[in-house]
Amino acid sequence: MLHLPIRMLGLWPAILFAVLVRADEYVAAEPGMPANRCWAVLIGINEYLDPAIPRLQYCVSDARLMARCLTEKCGYASERILLMTDDQTVDDLAAMPATRRAFVRHGVRFADSTVSYPVCCTSRASFLTGRYAHNHGVMGLYLPTGGYARFNDLDALPVWLQRVGYRTVHLGKYMNGYGSDRPAIVPPGWSEWYTAVDPTTYRMWNYTLNVNGELITYGGPGEEPERLYQTDVLRDFALDAIRRAAGDPQPLFMTLSFLAPHHEEGPVRARTGVTVRPARSASANAC
């Protein structure tokens, strides 16, 4: 396994894994994957990840240059899928055999990291801008110094990527205050949007997603069918978007940001007596 030092901005320094594959290699089992596309899957933990994998190691941490790197340096249309978990530790990977099989075996291991501002919302803003907190202005989780209301989404990565022809998709958690500090609209630059709306974000059931401009609630008080578990609903939306993108010449940039394993909201924890509820059918080998 190749070890590369990189710089990341975010919460909880962690060993990350990235896999760069050609569609005719590792992902050939997925019908319709074009062989002339460069696919990369990046896994992060609330962190900004430089695309410092071998083909793209000259890309710099300024996110505004990512689009140019992908289109000019890769040599062919390239896809980027970022999987982000929340408050996960490195040690959690010991209980995730499926993740280790899928990514560690085929990927690049990043064993070095630097955290510039270890706060959730601040780090997400750094990921979307390539800027330090004092430059993008999101200095915390809540107003008046932080939260989504402080973020300028007119000058951010999805906007830049759309300008150079990318289809951009976000799923899951966005920023603290999305839907409470500011209205839950689809921000500029996103072609598809499946995003948790505050104050329901920190629930595995009875949460609301903005699905391309339509607010849809999944489950309700006492209504918790397994098929509506938040992680699985986001997964299914993501798989659908990936399959549609596989047959489309337009390159894809996707961020899939899970709530898990972050704790659920206080009332849910008080009612259930647990920090976060797993899917009812979850097994030790599911992850």
Image (cartoon, rainbow, N blue to C red):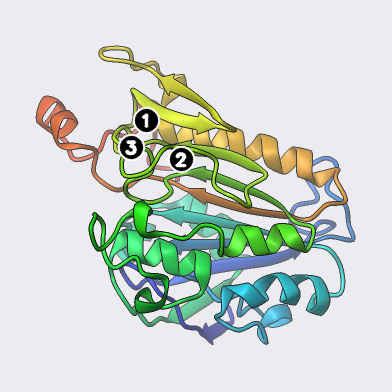
Give the image quarter of residue 22: bottom right
Label 1, residues with CA under 10 Å away: few <14, some 14-19, many ≥20: some
Q: Where 263 falls versus 224 (above or below)?
A: below
> As shown in the figure, which amino acid type bears the numbered disc 1?
Ala
- How far apart in space, not on screen, are marks 1 and 3 (Cα)? 21 Å
**First in residue order: circle 1 vs circle 3:** 3
Q: Mark 1: which secondary structure?
A: loop
Q: CA distance from mark 3 to mark 2?
A: 28 Å
Q: Residue 141: which quarter of the image?
A: bottom left
Q: Which mark is residue 32?
A: none
Q: Is label 2 in a helix, a strand or a loop?
A: loop
Q: Is residue 280 above or below residue 234?
A: above
Q: Nearer the viewer, residue 243 or 281?
A: 243
Q: Which residue is the site of mark 3?
A: 198
Query: Which callout, 3 or 2, points to the residue nearer the camera?
Result: 3
Q: Which mark is residue 279?
A: 1
- The residue at 73%/77% (across/down) is 69
